[in-house]
Amino acid sequence: MNRNLSIPLLWVLLMAGGMWLSAMHVSVHSELSDLLPEGTTRTQGLLLTQVRSGLAGRLMLLALEGGTPDEMAQVSRELSERLRASGQFALVENGAQGLTAQDRAIVFQARYLLSPRIGAETFSSESLRKALEQRLDDLRSPFAPLIKETIPADPTGEFLTILTAWSAEDRPAKHRGVWMSKDHSKALLVVETKVAGFDADAQAAVQEEIRHTFAVLAGQRAHLRLLMTGPGVFAVESKQTIEQEAWRLSTAAAALVLCFLYASYGSMALVLLSLIPLTAGIMAGMLAVQGWFGFIHGITLGFGITLLGVVDDYPIHLFSHLSSRGSVSAVMREIWPTMRLGVLTTAIGFAALLFAGFPALTQLGLFAVTGILTAALVTRWVLPTFVPDGFVPRPVWPAFHGELERLTRMKPVIPAAIVLACSTLLWSHTPLWQTDLASLSPVSEAKKQLDRQLRAEMGAPDVRDLLVIEGQTEEDVLQYAEVVDANLRPLRTSGTIAGYDLISNALPSRRTQQNRQSHLPERSVLMRNLDHALTGLHFSPGLFTPFVAAVESARTQPPLQRTTFEGTALGARMNSLLFEQGRSWMAVVPLRGVADREQLAAGVRNWNMPAVTYLDLKEESNRLMTAYRNRTSVIVVCGLFVIGVVLTIGQTSGSLLGPILFPIMSALAVVAAVLNLSGESLSLFHIASFLLVIGLGLDYALFFNRLEGSEEGRLRTLYGLLVCSTTTILVFGLLATSSIPVLHAIGITAALGSFCCLLFAGMMAKKVPDVS
Amino acid sequence: MTSGAPRTDRLLSHGRDSGLTGRRALRWGSGCGCVVVLLGSLGHAAAPSQWTVEVLMGLLKAQREHSVPFQEATYSSLLTKPLIAHGVLKFVPPDRLEKLITAPSHEQYVVEGNRVTFESERKGVKRTISLEEYPALRSFVEAFRSSLNGDVVQLYQVYEVTLEGSREEWTLLLRPREPSGKSVVDYILFTGSEGRVATIAIRAPDGDRSVMTILRGAGR
């Protein structure tokens, strides 16, 4: 009596504590990047850093549409001005702006250190003469007002040379000075947020601000629309999708399982009793993940609830073995060895996920293992104390055994199915493996379409190709970058690449700047050369005094540094191209319009510069996904092996191994084939789910082949088994409807898998000798 | 006589930060404008009863010569003597305008459709820009193109237009309406007689100016 009360009491206390803990401490994340792995190689590390916080992630494309081109140009100007003023962006470009006044002043002041044209001959009297004649042409030209004011201090035109070198090539078409799509249906802008692209909350705030600013500007012009795309926009959408889905799936799964249980047994008491291990399992899973990772991901939560469909097996196994004869505890003890084996194998299957090295899978694995073990233990030791004596739930539909008999006669279907499955896999046109990292993203196809369209119109194809330059110091990196520049130029000329953004073009290394300084002549030499060059040209006397003074002061000017631009638009741009990474410095060189990746990669290899890495983000991410998939496959095989060992040890009769393992393996082949036929390529999440299928399948097979004392007992066991597997299939089927690819993959694989397992296990089940 | 056509903010609208572009474009535009007005300037038309901008435009439009030689003098505060250049202005219907400088060195500006090509022998460059990118320039070119077609309304939209003098000896004064235009061009002054332009002076706000004199009789 004492014991009977103490266990429920303890359980109630634990549950209350757990609930309190969950309410107070569990923090749910929904950022996709939280689920990305660290990468196993240095290149993958670079890739993932770039994906997480790099330039590519922070770029956002905006488009205005729905108005006349003039209207949109106007709004584009106003919007870009306001966004720039907001201070949230490292860069806001709509085609209208050159450098800011602040940046122009810095560049003008440092023109003799920045201009690539400065050399030994730049200030000879011949060169000066040529330059001066060109300035006379300038004065006659329509550009005169632009150039005139710089002539006295910069007669050799270094400032303009720098600006021309910096102005990017391949830009979109313009209308009224701002970027427009070719058909003038959209005004285009590009912004670079200061916050990382994958920081969904910060991104959401920035995007909300853009929307708000636009709404204010558009005002009466309600026909104008704002479109946004980019990794940041995707991150926000992913997060919202994940949050909604986690909620929707949990609620639906819980409702589905409970309703189905009620429908199968017509007993409210049974439903309530089942909740005891179910809630305990889920809470334990949640707390374990929270404790281990410090947060629980929305995807894990959405998946975790579907665990309901798995762990409800345990109470149902118990209920379906109850009879009016034995006590509940006795029945529990009797079926425990079988259940324990099923629990162990299922848990081993999930435990394998812990070693996948992919945070998404690790979380799911930990959640599931903890949940399953807890639910099983609660079923074993807590649940019986709650079950009233004489509680014998009756199947609502007892006439099912006839169907079952027919099922065993259909055994030959299995080999046929396997042959069919294998041939499907061999001759299918659908690629067997899915390797795109983008396949992780729950972003809708419409959004992806918009992204492609805007990128094409912007002439800004996906930031896919990068050079990464690493060095001990900033100066090292800049010096490497200058060598890279010299190496890239021929590739641009030959059309292998269309263009590139290189930090050293805006910020030359100290060495280069000092080298340029060494070419600046002494005052007396410069004046002599200048006088000589001016002969016969009717410039006002003394006009070039500022020039002589500027060269003189540039001779001793301290080299320009990145910090000189601190806080300016150009400075922000520089910080995204050159930054400190751990203890070294890193420059990122986005390459535009790569026509031939193999040639480029070969070219970069031939430079023999260990500091330079060529990254094809797409290729690299594919390699990453493939690496993790292979690792997961190995783990699945290992898991399978361990399960086999446990089975051999746990199962007294070795002859049962065949009927248990064979249906499962057949089911896996059939699932793979069906998925492939439906046009789905296998990702590492499908593979991981195979383990889940194995675990579930084992549980069914074990109970199918359990020797029962009576025909009636056997029938009730089978009925329970049907109920268990149906809830599993229902819940995973629900998961398959998710728009989150990870959950969809797990759901569809597990639902199909458990269905096939059940079917095949039923067909292969040993005929029990009629004892009665 | 001043014609007060309505201001259209639309035509020359751009923000503060595009001053650079705007200035370049205005100067450009005025150059192109000269070409068009000039090209329509040769020959006579039937004498109407009143001397108005519309009548003058009609005269300028009526005859279009495809090539006229000119001499251009540029006065700048940076220089002690004016720069003298010689060249030819050309118009190829329907929309190709050229300013070709033959001395002291070879230079060429070509406006065709929406594209402007600049070529300089001394600088060794050839550049093409799109009028789309320079909204002010575009409106200027459009305005002068339409004046070729007798579309006086367009001209009024960009400039305050003042016609003085008689049919035999007139001056046509164009002042940009927009602030961005005013910041680089103070005025453009045409002089002429009947449908023939004699000189085109362009004055910048800082006092620098260029005077283009059409060399009568040397062309044809």
Image (cartoon, helix red, strand yellow):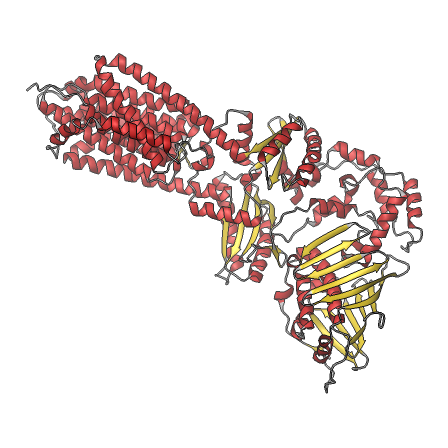
Q: Residue at x 68, y 65 (%)?
A: B95
The C terminus of chain A sits in image quarter: top left
Say whether residue A654 is left or right of residue B185: left
**A103 or A329: which is nearer to us?**
A103
Q: Position of residue B92 (x, y in %)?
A: 71, 66
The N terminus of chain A sits in image quarter: top left
Q: Quadrant of residue A177?
A: bottom right
Q: Quadrant of residue A639?
A: top left
Q: Residue at x 16, y 35 (%)?
A: A264
User: Is residue A12 among what the camera can see?
Assistant: yes
Q: Position of residue A29 (x, y in %)?
A: 42, 35
Q: Residue at x 18, y 26 (%)?
A: A386
Q: Position of residue A510 (x, y in %)?
A: 75, 33
Single out the residue that lies furthest toward the left: A772
Q: Quadrant of residue A138?
A: bottom right
All told, the count of numbered labels is 0
Say whether residue A480 is left or right of residue A53: right
Single out the residue that lies furthest toward the bottom: B49
- Residue B41 vs A726, above or below: the answer is below
- Residue A56 vs A357, above or below: the answer is below
**A580 or A95: which is nearer to us?**
A95
Say whether residue B4 is left or right of residue A421: right
Q: Residue at x 15, y 20 (%)?
A: A331
Q: Position of residue A122 (x, y in %)?
A: 84, 41
User: Is residue A394 among what the camera can see?
Assistant: no
